[in-house]
Image: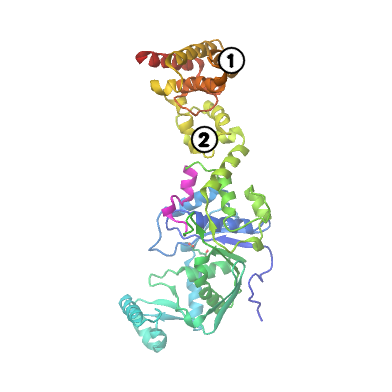
Amino acid sequence: MTDLSPGSLPGSRRLRFAPSPTGQLHIGSVRTALLSYCLAGEDGRFLVRIEDTDRERFVPGATTGYLGALAWMGLRWDEGPDIGGPCAPYVESERLEHYLQAADRLLDTGAAYRCLCSKERLDDLRAAQKAAGQPTRYDRRCWHLPKAEVQAELDRGTSSVIRLLMPEGESRWDDLVLGPQEFQNGEIDDQVLIKSDGFPTYHLAQVVDDHLMEITHVIRGVEWVPSTPKHLAVYRALGWVPPAFAHVPLVLGPDHKKLSKRHGSVAVADYRDMGYVPEALANMIAFLGWSPGTEEEIFTLEELRSRMTFDRLQSSPAVFDQQRLDHLNGVWIRRLSIPDVAQRLRPFLPQAQDSQLEPIAAMVQERIHRLDEVPGLMQFAFAEPDPTREELIGRLDAATAMNFLRAAAELVGGNSTALMDDLKRAAEESASEPGTIKRHVRDCMQVVRVAITGQRVSPPLPESIDLIGKEVALSRLRRALAVIAKVG
Ligand code: GLU
């Protein structure tokens, strides 16, 4: 007897990510992709298959966005339909003949049947079942019809679908995350496998492709659990060995409700635009369903691929915590080389010259959690700041502020090589009360910082001055003096 137990397929693992291109790639889906990529392991294969046979939900252009987001995340797939060619993913709408062949086999063996019922009849049936407090399901009217009658209707051109005849008995599988699962088939509807437009539903296409692509393990969201008995019925009817299933729990928002747009962004592309680096996002997402069982928290994708095992997948829902992501992102930004940070900053600083990017990267690397903080932090490099008199003076009085600005201008103009030390010394000397020197120094530095950058928080002054050039820095100091003098 064929061993139909999950995971009984020999050889190395083959896992797939099978998104339906209906919008943008979301955190929940990319989690499935990442777990599948990692759990394929170093010797296994990771495939991407675009499940685009639901023509009503299909969004043109979505596939490109999905593939772009996967590539950005570093989730590269190992094979596709073009043998030896560049790796395009599998696309179900290009593989219709396989599903139609399988449907014919199912019809031939009686595991599936044609259904001629109109949408109106199905709606009425549903409404009547609801009103009677019964579960809504197809009543198998067409299965009971004599074959000749059905054929006559088809010959007349009546449109039809192909339904799976859900067999009697139970469906069981040992889920790699959820443990043993059991469903009574009698409670499961006869699923449509081929729609009236001739396209397969996900349920048939997925089984056929997972079989033909020799998928060993299916990782997908827990919302697919109710579909799995239907899939097992198709495998059985076709005499195929099903893969092992791992249904991973929901990803929750901070309020412990399913992560959705209500929680802000959920699309991977939005996280890229917010200045998260893919290394950090991958690191974060891995923990939404897996844990190493140690205190370690920083992993590269390749480390994850070599470390991850099914037995450490988590069965309880994971919370997507943006603060943790910010923390990991900061750690990851600091792990990158300066040229690498510079390159990643490019889209965030369209106005910067190429030669400015590396100095900027060096100035901000230690200070940021997200790359999109940089335009604000570096605004002073691209636009003249325009601080008000109050902002400039801060906690000083006008005369002290002006004196210190003059001293600073002299130091900057005189090419001081230890500008911060010299500024500090000048500030200390100008302090009137010994007890408040520290605070006075801070206030003095603040005047110069605001004069040169327009900001109370900025990268270090010497580097900021290097970036804008000494002449520009001097003119800003003079302008600040004029602003204070005007009303004072
Ligand atoms: N196409 C399904 C989706 O979009 C895939 C489910 C599965 O991985 O089996 O979620």
- Residue 121: where, in percent of width, then height? 32, 79
- Identified at 60% across, 18% down, the residue is 421
Q: Secondary structure at mark 1?
A: helix
Quarter of the image with the N terminus is bottom right
- Residue 480: where, in percent of width, then height? 42, 17
Q: What span is colored magenta in the figure?
A: 258-273
Q: Amino acid at mark 2?
A: Leu
- Residue 16: where, in percent of width, then height? 57, 61
Residues 183 and 12: in front is: 183
Q: Secondary structure at mark 2?
A: helix
| Magenta run includes residue 261 | yes
Q: Is residue 385 visible?
A: no
Q: How many marks?
A: 2
- Identified at 41% across, 54% down, the residue is 262
Image disc number at residue 345: 2
Q: Residues within 10 Å of mark 1 (few under 14, many from 20)?
A: few
